[in-house]
Image (spheres, coloured by chain):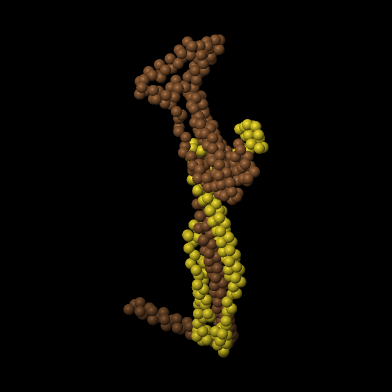
Chain colours: A brown, B yellow
Amino acid sequence: MLSVGQLKTHHSFSVEFVISRCFAGFSRETSLRLCRRARRGRNKKQGARRSNNSASQPSVMLSRLIVVSVNSLKGCGPIGAGLVHASRSLHTSPQSLAPLPPLPEKGGKVRHGIFPEELFQLLYPKTGVTGPYMLGTGLILYMLSKEIYVINHETFAAASIGTAIIYGVKKFGPTVANLADKINEEKVAKAQEVKDVAISSLTQAIDDEKKEQWRVEGRSMLFDAKRNNVAMLLETNYRERLHMVTNEVKRRLDYQIALQNLHHRLEQEHMINWVEKNVISSITPQQEKESIAKCITDLKVLAKATQARAAA
Amino acid sequence: MASRRVALKAVDWLAFAERVPPNQRSMFNALKTRSDAISAKLASLPETPAAIDWSFYRSAVAKAGMVDEFEKKFKALQIPEPVDTQTSAINAQEAEANKSALAYVEASKARIAQYEEELTKFKNMIPFDQMTMDDLNDAFPETRLDKVKYPYWPHKPIADL
């Protein structure tokens, strides 16, 4: 294209810039859309169509590229103006970066496995219920009679293989579909479990941390207890000292008193013993006889007195 | 004799026991028994010793002046209060503990912030059945298949399947 050739010489920078931006956006979007489709195993079984959003993208993007290049060619002045043009039209693209809505759960409805329901709905107003069938029959007969489709060996091969395939799908389809769904659900359940475990463990960890912080707040109590212990020990020690002093003084005083008492007692006893000894040694035999005689007369008097009292 | 009455700060042992983590419970119990023993010993001693009856002794003891001399010396006696060597050490310990506690709380808060961030990430995730493989790889980077290291399907060692 002549315009492109011109562009290359004058505005190579702006066009390359534009191209790279466009293709970057294009590749990201394609990867998103394609990956989506890859998950829908069931659609493959029922032969659903793939919507052709991705197919339309390149044409849109390329046309935009041409628009941009034309804009800058129109300006055909300094490079600055072309760049401003290019950036402005890029920013006004309808492509949005919002997350796409989820895909529908089932594919488009089909009849007999291949013919979309929309065809039947399309023909219903004009030809009623049997319209599409008549159309199909007519088409087949037309192709057979005009030999547009020629019956040959391949026809029988196709018929038998088709029968076998349809029989297989009808018989084992649901089973295999359920199996695939189960496998998929197991994967999702595993991922879900990972997520749940992660959430619960995180909340638990947060609670534990908060609890530990609360525990740390009580650290002053430990030191209060320690200081109390020290104070109590000191007080105890002081009181013990007081008691000790008092007791010792008392003991000494009591000792003095006890000593005095002892002396007193010893003196008393010694004196008594000495007096007794002297008295006994001073008693002469004569005195002893006299005292015994006196005792006897005293006894006789006493005996008479008691006899008289007893008689009276 | 001046008797000291140091104000003892009441320690709420129940609240203290609540805050003790289970792995330090034995140390706490030892502390409590020791504290209880000390306070019991303190309570068993009367605050002031029994006063000495000087008049009785003066009349009883024969030696002249002995009791007076004793009394004079006794009254003049100043019993030294025991020196407190541990409180400063305890205060130093407390300051250090406060410092380390602050550091721990800061680290704990950082950890909580990190956990909260991960929690919001998990809570704001789209449900799994609306995710594409790209979304899954963004949410859980460990599911990303390394197509450079293993260029051929299944893009991971066979043992990992």
Task: Residue lying at the far right in this picture: please name it.
Answer: B149
Answer with left or right where residue A177 lies relative to residue A303: right
Which quarter of the rendering shows the C terminus of chain A?
bottom left
Q: Position of residue B63 (x, y in %)?
A: 57, 87
Q: Nearer the viewer, residue A128 or A278?
A: A128
Q: Is residue A229 above or below residue B23?
A: below
Answer with left or right where residue A15 lies relative to residue A116: right
Q: Position of residue B26 (x, y in %)?
A: 56, 56
Q: Nearer the viewer, residue A278 or B7?
A: B7
Residue B80 visible within the image: yes
Q: Is residue B61 above or below residue A68?
A: below
Q: Nearer the viewer, residue A220 or B83?
A: A220
Q: How many labels, in total?
A: 0
Place residue B71 in its image quadrant: bottom right
Q: Position of residue A12 (x, y in %)?
A: 63, 44
Q: Position of residue A276 (x, y in %)?
A: 56, 84
Which quarter of the rendering shows the N terminus of chain A?
top right
Query: What residue is drawn where x is 36% and y is 22%?
Result: A126
Task: Residue lying at the far bottom in this picture: please name it.
Answer: B64
Query: What residue is drawn where x is 49% and y is 16%?
Result: A167
Query: What residue is drawn where x is 45% and y is 30%?
Result: A106
Residue B38 visible within the image: no
Query: What residue is drawn where x is 65% and y is 32%?
Result: B152
Q: Nearer the viewer, residue A233 or A6?
A: A6
